[in-house]
C-alpha cells in the first residue's frame, strides 16, 4: 500500500501538471498548493450478484475531488455518462481510469467536466475489484477555491463563486444519493 501511495502520488502530480497545461496554464500551477494534498483510498469489491437486474452496484454520481485515479481488475461494470447515454468502460489490462472531479471542473471554469459514472451489479462469476484514489485539498484548508484567475476575464467571466473547501465537504456530506455534480451548488 505504501508503494502504491508513493507511485500514485507521483502520477497525480504529473497528471495535475498535464491538466493545467491543457488549460493553457503553467504545468506547475498546482505545485505548492494544497489542492492535491489529501488522498483517500477506497477499495471496492463486487461479488457475483445472482439477480443483477434487481439492484445496482454503485449509483450514478460524480466525485467531488480534483480527480480520481482508478485501478480495476478485468471484470467489467464501470459505466460513464456521455451525452446522456451510459457507456460501458471495458477494462484494459494495465490501464488506469482517470476521472475529473467537481472541484477541477470549478477550477477550470467549466473547461473540464466532472465525469458522471456508476457501477452495475456484477453478473459474472469472478468478483469485480477496484481501488480508487481520490485527490483533493485538506478538509481544514481555509483557502478560497474558485476558477483559476487566469481563466476568467470580462469576456470570459467566472462561472462559479469563491468558496472554502469546508463548504464543498458540507455539500458532499449532505448530498442525496443519486444526485450529480456538486459544481452546480457553486455556479453563479
Image (spheres, helix red, strand yellow):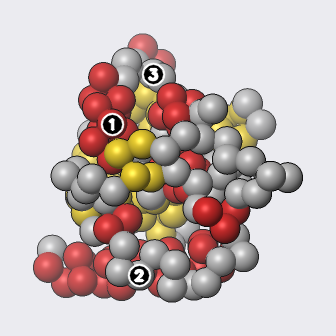
**Nearer-the-camera pick, 118 or 55:** 118
Residue 9 point in image, percent of width and height: 32, 78
Residue at 54%, 67% (x, y): give it. 92
Residue found at the far top of this picture = 54
| Nearer the camera: disc 2 or disc 3 | 2
Mark 1, residues whose alpha carbon is within 10 Å: few (<14), some, or many (≥20)?
few
Residue 187 shows up from this direction: yes
**Nearer-the-camera pick, 56 or 17:** 17
Q: CA distance from mark 2 to mark 1?
A: 23 Å
- Residue that label 3 marks: 178
Q: How many marks?
A: 3
Q: Quadrant of the C terminus?
A: top right
Q: Are marks 2 and 3 in contact (CB under 8 Å)?
A: no
Residue 187 point in image, percent of width and height: 60, 33
Query: Image height check: is 9 above or below 175?
Result: below
Helix, strand, or loop for circle 3?
A: loop
Residue at 60%, 74% (x, y): give it. 20
Q: Residue 167: which numbered mark, if any?
A: 1
Helix, strand, or loop for circle 2?
A: loop
Mark 2 or mark 1: whose residue is earlier in sequence: 2
| Nearer the camera: disc 1 or disc 3 | 1
Query: Image height check: is 94 above or below 127?
Result: below
Among the 4 quarters of the image, the one containing residue 72: bottom left
As drawn, is 36 to the left or to the right of 42?
right
Mark 2 or mark 3: whose residue is earlier in sequence: 2
- Residue that label 2 marks: 31
Q: CA distance from mark 2 to mark 3?
A: 34 Å
As drawn, is 89 to the left or to the right of 57?
right
As drawn, is 173 to the left or to the right of 77?
left
Among the 4 quarters of the image, the one containing residue 163: top left
Residue at 85%, 52% (x, y): give it. 155
Amino acid at each position: 500500500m505504501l508503494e502504491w501511495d508513493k507511485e500514485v502520488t507521483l502520477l497525480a502530480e504529473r497528471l495535475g501538471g498535464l491538466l493545467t497545461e491543457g488549460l493553457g496554464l503553467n504545468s506547475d500551477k498546482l505545485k505548492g498548493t494544497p489542492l492535491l494534498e489529501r488522498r483517500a483510498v477506497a477499495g471496492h469489491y463486487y461479488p457475483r450478484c445472482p439477480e443483477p437486474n434487481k439492484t445496482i452496484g454503485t449509483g450514478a454520481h460524480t466525485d467531488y475531488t480534483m480527480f480520481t485515479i482508478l485501478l480495476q481488475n478485468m471484470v467489467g461494470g464501470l459505466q460513464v455518462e456521455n451525452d446522456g447515454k451510459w457507456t460501458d468502460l471495458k477494462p484494459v489490462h494495465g490501464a488506469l481510469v482517470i476521472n475529473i472531479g467537481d472541484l477541477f471542473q470549478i477550477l477550470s471554469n467549466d473547461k473540464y467536466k466532472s465525469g458522471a459514472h456508476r457501477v452495475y451489479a456484477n453478473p459474472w462469476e469472478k468478483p469485480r475489484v477496484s481501488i480508487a484514489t481520490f485527490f483533493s485539498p485538506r478538509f481544514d484548508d481555509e483557502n478560497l477555491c474558485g476558477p483559476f484567475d487566469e481563466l476568467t476575464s470580462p469576456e470570459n467571466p467566472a462561472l462559479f463563486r469563491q468558496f472554502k473547501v469546508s463548504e464543498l465537504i458540507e455539500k458532499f456530506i449532505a448530498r442525496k444519493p443519486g444526485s450529480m455534480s456538486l459544481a452546480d451548488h457553486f455556479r453563479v
